[in-house]
Amino acid sequence: MDLAARLPITRDTSGGDLVSAVDAWVEANVPRAWRDASAGGRQAIRAVRSRGEYAEWYPTFAASGLAVATWPGAYGGLDLTPAQARLAEGRLSPYNLGRLNPLGLHNMAPALFAHGTEEQRLRFFPPMVANEERWCQLFSEPGAGSDLASLAMRAERDGDEWVLTGQKVWSTWAHHSEFGICLARTDPSAPKRQGIGYFLVKLRSAGVEVRELRHMGGVVDFNEVWFDDVRVPDFHRVGDPADGWRVAASTLAGERQMVAGSGSGGVDRIGGSGIDRLIESARGTDLAATIRDRLISLCTEERIRGWTNERMRATVKAGGTPGPAASIGKVHQGALNQKIQMLATDLLGPAAMAFESAETWAASLPYEVTGMIRSRANSIEGGTTEVNKNVIGEKVLGLAREPDPYHGVNWEDTPR
Ligand SMILES: Cc1cc2nc3c(=O)[nH]c(=O)nc-3n(C[C@H](O)[C@H](O)[C@H](O)COP(=O)(O)OP(=O)(O)OC[C@H]3O[C@@H](n4cnc5c(N)ncnc54)[C@H](O)[C@@H]3O)c2cc1C
């Protein structure tokens, strides 16, 4: 990461100077065409900026420190206060400079902040923030999804290394990633949550095979990942060898926040249409009363979602952790986004059904339809709606725990 390109602002910089510095940085670094398009909103920017161009330019943004403005300088940030970061965000928002590497930022980083060593943070954060090392999450297995703690991938210690063997599945973006956070069983003779290690695995290691899975939208987003005696240095282990379950809790809370949109990451990027965009496009058209009704009730729900997330952000800013309450936003956002995407598709009418040939249909679908198809995953990814309702019932409302006849039984003696 280019430290010389870091924006010259600190916690002592006044609000006015901060705004001037960010504006000057935009003028000098954000390409002219993107700045000109910004007056027309996100759609106009997307029309002049491909994803590839954005990824190529992204290291410039990361080097400024603005991508993770509240993080310490040594990790790639500017060490700003949350209020300063919000001010900077406000100046940047017209240019739609989204953060890349969300599974690094929201899944790996919370675990390293809470349980990693300083050496690990210095090694892994800067290239992750710069999107030079992209991250994926290798938790789910064919026999361990909702009941993640029953996972079977083995990790055996061999001197200064661990040897990992087994299979992961639904690993989003593993085919584009350099690293993955991975849970593996270090002690089969312990109860299932007590014998798990948390590892940072280099995907281009001998013995790792990534096989792409195509989902119903016709696109490859996730993969199966096979491990055959993969050697991982002990330096890449986070937390105690048998305490990976606790480390994973930081990751899962960060993931739920991201999917629910209460983190700095992007609910706007899930699916194709936000409710505001739908209202914008419906304005001035002759809408049926039932459609108006759906728009208004979704708009109301969207505002409630926003306030719930505000409350969560305020808790985090006040030094608290979102904890099990993150499940509330996750459950609500999953259902809400599915309703919004379905309405967007309904508004298209017959155009939503106009497929071309079987070979090209995925590429020919309007974004409203791909958004609607993608949104079906919202109630599964990051923990299913049913499982998150269990979390809310038990940990937020204090209801009785779900019965577990194998509680305390060693993993190797538990039927799977
Ligand atoms: C788009 C997408 C991306 C994903 N990306 C990743 C990734 O990057 N990395 C990763 O590790 N995983 C990823 N996953 C996997 C995801 O975390 C799992 O799919 C999820 O946890 C559910 O596990 P499962 O698919 O094994 O379903 P199961 O656990 O087999 O559940 C099947 C059904 O039973 C219900 N159920 C299960 N247990 C209970 C219970 N105790 N009470 C009530 N109902 C229950 C579930 O709600 C569900 O409806 C992704 C999934 C999707 C859809």
Image: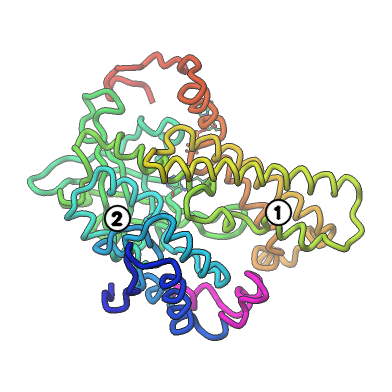
Mark 2: C-beta under 8 Å from nearest atom of ligand 1 = no
Q: Residue 365, image x and y in percent?
A: 70, 64
Whether 46 is among the magenta residues is yes
Q: Residue 269, image x and y in percent?
A: 57, 58
- Determine whether 268 is above or below 308 in the image: below
Q: Residue 32, image x and y in percent?
A: 54, 86
Foreground mark, 1 or 2, reads 1
Q: Is residue 229 left or right of residue 28?
A: left
Of the numbered discs 1 and 2, the one sitting upstream in the chain is: 2
- For the stretch drawn in magenta, the main secondary structure is helix
Badge 1 amino acid: Ile
Q: Quadrant of the N terminus?
A: bottom left
Mark 1 neighbour class, 10 Å CA radius: few under 14, some 14 to 19, many 20 or more? many
Q: Which mark is residue 275?
A: 1
**What residue is shown with label 2?**
208
The residue under the point 85% across, 48% down is 291
Q: Quadrant of the C terminus?
A: top left
Residues 388 and 317: in front is 317
Start-end of magenta stretch? 35-55
Mark 2 neighbour class, 10 Å CA radius: few under 14, some 14 to 19, many 20 or more? many
The residue under the point 29% across, 66% down is 127
Q: Secondary structure at mark 2?
A: strand
- Determine whether 121 is above or below 397 in the image: below
Q: Which mark is residue 157?
A: none
Marks 1 and 2, how far apart at CA: 41 Å
Q: Quadrant of residue 93?
A: bottom right
Badge 2 amino acid: Val
Judged from this view, the residue extending furthest toward the left is 159
